[in-house]
Structure formats: structure tokens, C-alpha cells
Image: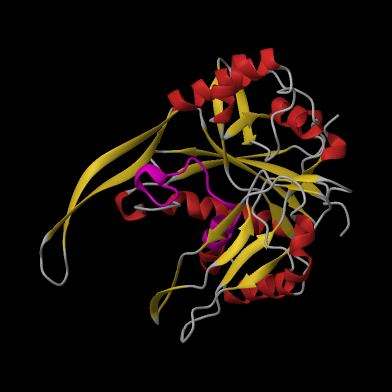
Amino acid sequence: MRPPSRTLLFALRFRGRFRAGRGGEDAGLSFPSDTLFGALCHAGAACWGPDALRALLDRCLGGQPPFRFTSAFPFVVDGRREVFLLPRPHRPPPGFEDPALREGHARGVKGLRFVPRDAFRAWVAGRAPDYGACLEVDRLLSEQFRLDLAPHVALGRADAQPDYHQVASVWVRQGAGLYLLAAFEDAGWVEPFVAALRWLGDGGIGGRRGRGMGQFEVAVRDVGEDADWRGFGPVPQGTGCLLSRLAPEPRSATSLLTAGYELVEAGGWAMSEAGQARHRRVWMLAEGSVLPRWDPGRLVEVTPRGWQGHPVYRWGFGFAFGAGEAG
């Protein structure tokens, strides 16, 4: 694959609350790349038309996606500065062979899900980051992204008995939000991608959209020449740390499991005029997994068995930061 023509950053600032993940205590502070693609396809059908969407899927099925993108991660505000967070790499914390460093930070570092960009670079390179700064930014994250659990009672359809459960949502402080990076191999897809994201912002992303959750404003910036984002966009030439989920080719998957990694089982619902059904689940490498070599990933068909609607696909193309760029 040739180097991407453009790398853009999309900052999503929410107008209210959003709901990601399974809900309850499993509610998330990010949207995985495969979830984003499902939402983009829904938006694309409205913005681009079915023919353009079909053309995109055909390119992806042929292994030539016009763009790659990360999952949507949090960014927080520290004074007037935006601090962009990235997934904690799935490798031991560098420097923890020093008992003094480990003793001072072990408990806090163990609970980190995201780290600041500079700490991410150092961690991927095998250098000890500023763990104090990591914990301070984690404190800002807990202050600026607050998980609320609200009681909810619904009546069962069959017996009309009350069903008590909790509905989770995430409140975001003004100025903070989520962001994603997208690398475009085909610059002609920049405008359609932006249009689909803005369409999603008006309708919302995630759960409880009918109640106004998940709506956001989109700000776009070109970071291709920004030194702070060097290495975020080009395909890694060697070892890389995933910033998206990845579905590798089955025949090569086991050769990737030689470094730090996490597996996630991705599922969901397929919906069309024919009704709805759970689509087939697929195992994927999670964000933060460290690959010994680059694997571009693929589009996975997950159409439910017996489904009478349109084909259903799971986005499994990867976006990774190259370890060679971490110095």
C-alpha cells in the first residue's frame, strides 16, 4: 500500500451525553473502529447513496480500502491545552524493573486504560514515560468524563412485569471529547467521509440516540505535517502498536500473537427492512496490541444465518503506530 495522501484528525465534541459499550459498569469511554464503520455505513447510505456505498464495500472486499482510521479515543483539557489520549500498549510498563519506580506507581499504572501521546510514544519505544504525568492526566479524564448510572424500569412485552435495570451514559466536560485519526489513500474520499461524520453528529452515535444521546459537532484538522503526530498515519514498516481493532487473515493470525496483545469478541445487531438479528461474532485484536509485523486486516462478512436483508460486514482494517517512529 502506498503512503496515505492525507492524515486528518476529527475532534468530536458532544452536545450532551453519549452511550458506548454494553451499558452499566461496562459502558465505555471510546468507540471501536468497527463500531464506527457500521455507523459510517448507515450515514453513507443516506449521504452518498447505495451505489457509492456498494463501491466502497467492493474496494474493501478487494483489500484496497480508500482510507484507514483509528478507534475514537478521549481527549481532555488541561488549561488551554488539549491532551490527546491513546490506548495503553499491551506490553509491560517500561522501567518497572526498577523497584523504586514500580513501588511508587504500580497500583495507579495498573489501572490505566489510556495514556497521553508522549507517554504512548515512550512506552512503545520501551522507554519509561513520565508515570506521574500519566496519572495526572488519568485524574483529568475521570473528572471530565463522568459515568452516570440512572435507574430505569421497563414493562416486559410478554407478561407486563416490571424489569428494573440501570442505564449508563457518559457526561463530557465542555471542551473535551473524543477524536479519531483517518489516513486517506484516496483523497477523493475525504469529503464523503467528513459528510458522513457530520450526518452522524446530527443524529447521534451509540445507544439511546432516540433520547438525544450521542450528538456531536465535528472539527477537522490536517495533521499530516504536524511533528506531534509524526508516525500516526503511514503504514508501519516493522513492529507497530494498534490504534484500531484488527481482523487479520486467518492463516497469518497466529504469527501475530508473539508480542503483547488482547483479543476481543465483536458482535452486534443487523437491521434492515427485513427486521433485525444478531450477526455472527468475530474475534479481533484490540487497540494497544503490539504487532511484530504489519498486517493490513480485512473486511469480515458477518451476515446472520438465514438473514433476508443486505450483507453485513465488520470493519477489520488496521491503523497502527510504528515503533520505529517512537524515538
> Foreground residue, 300 or 88?
88
Instruction: Give the extent of the magenta segment.
Output: 19-39
Measured along the vertical axis of the image, is residue 319 above or below residue 254?
Answer: above
- Quarter of the rendering occupied by the C terminus: top right
Residue at 77% from the left image edge and 56% from the top image edge: 256
**Residue drawn where x is 64% and y is 54% of the image:** 245
Q: Position of residue 225 (x, y in %)?
A: 82, 35
Q: Is residue 308 above or below residue 121?
A: below
Q: Quadrant of residue 17?
A: top left
Please report the residue visible at 75 percent of the width from the left and 59 percent of the height from the top.
188
Residue 147 belongs to the span the image colors magenta:
no
Q: Could you say which is closer to the camera, residue 154 or residue 232?
A: 154
Residue 5 left/right relative to 210: right
Image position of 260 (left or right of 23): right
Q: Position of residue 283 (x, y in %)?
A: 60, 63
Whether 286 is drawn above or below 317: the answer is above
Question: Can the viewer see residue 108 in this picture?
Answer: yes
Give coordinates of residue 49: x percent, y percent: 57, 72
